Amino acid sequence: MPELPEVETIKEHLRELVVGSLITQVEVLDPGLVEQPSTEEFERELEGDWISGARRRAKHLIVELDSGNFLVFQLKIGGQLLLVPPVEEPKTALMLVLHLDGDRRLFLRDETRFTRARLLNAEELEARLSTLGPEPLEDEFKNNGVKYLQEILSSRRAQIKPLLLDQKVVSGIGNIYVDEILYDARLHPRRKANTLSSEEWGRLHAAITENLAAGVEHRGTTVRLYKDVLNRPGEHQNYLRVFEKQGKPCPGCEGEVIREKVGGRPTHFCPSCQLEEWREGEQELTLG
Ligand SMILES: [Zn+2]
């Protein structure tokens, strides 16, 4: 499931390998892919355009075009952008082929077929991205993120995990990194945001930036489907402590990692390190 670090890795590859290319032919193989405009218009507009840049916003991969248009992908669960032909190439998984000059092809492959693409002008792009929360690896969030998180969340009674997955709160966090973040911050995923102490907001902020930066450094996490543009897995899966580690020992204590649903999502945590009743326990202790 591509989150910030995986989309960031793909974006960097596109900058290195694809920017400056001419799109000579466009084949949409799955009509469910294109949300906007029509498939015919999508193909017609893209053909003959040059790829002038690539950027990322939250989990959106944005290909900048010479015409001033933007090709925006949401890779959702299993989307892969590949410069090398998929090995077995099952026709059902291939959603789009962009033929580039120099006899190269950029394949969009997705077994789950949830990937969506849009061709937008600058105004449409801005409107589409306008509700997204701050980028956690940008300086503004790195420097003022503790205050920001407290301001927008500390009066919320919702559980902390679903709040962190809300792209309006912070951009780019999905179900893998959020479990690792909450583990590092020693916060139970069901803790209500309005019960966090100042120290816990500080720990949470540090865990967000550190985990996402490590994910980028390790070129993403491949649990199942994620591959980079050259069809290589990432390496951050080797650094996960709790995600899908249920039944395994917690690296920080004698306990065992467990898996439960929180906010409808499979959630992995250590019930000894991430105490659900931490705050209440603390208060009782204080009251004597
Ligand atoms: Zn533990």
Image (tube, rainbow, N blue to C red):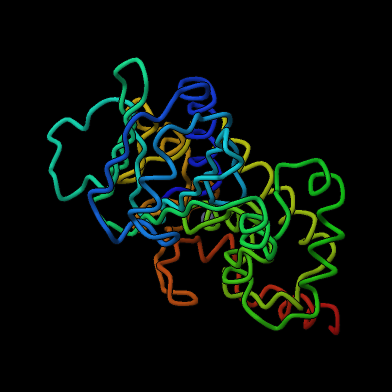
Query: Closer to the camera, 217 or 50?
Result: 50
Query: Closer to the camera, 43 or 112?
Result: 43
Residue ranking furthest to the top: 102
* Left or right placement of residue 88 versus residue 66 in this view: left
The residue under the point 33% across, 59% down is: 114
Residue 243 x, y percent position in the rendering = 43, 53
- Which image quadrant is residue 168 in? bottom right
Residue 176 x, y percent position in the rendering = 47, 53
* Left or right placement of residue 61 versus residue 40 in this view: right
Query: Closer to the camera, 214 or 95?
Result: 95
Residue 136's place in the image compared with 263, above or below, is above
The residue under the point 49% across, 28% down is: 14
- Counting the numbered discs, the total is 0
Residue 132 x, y percent position in the rendering = 67, 61
* Left or right placement of residue 23 versus residue 270 in this view: left
Residue 53's place in the image compared with 6, above or below, is above
Residue 232 x, y percent position in the rendering = 34, 28
Pick the quarter of the image with the C terminus: bottom right
Residue 203's place in the image compared with 87, above or below, is below
The residue under the point 61% across, 41% down is: 68
* Left or right placement of residue 139 versus residue 229 in this view: right
The residue under the point 27% across, 58% down is: 31
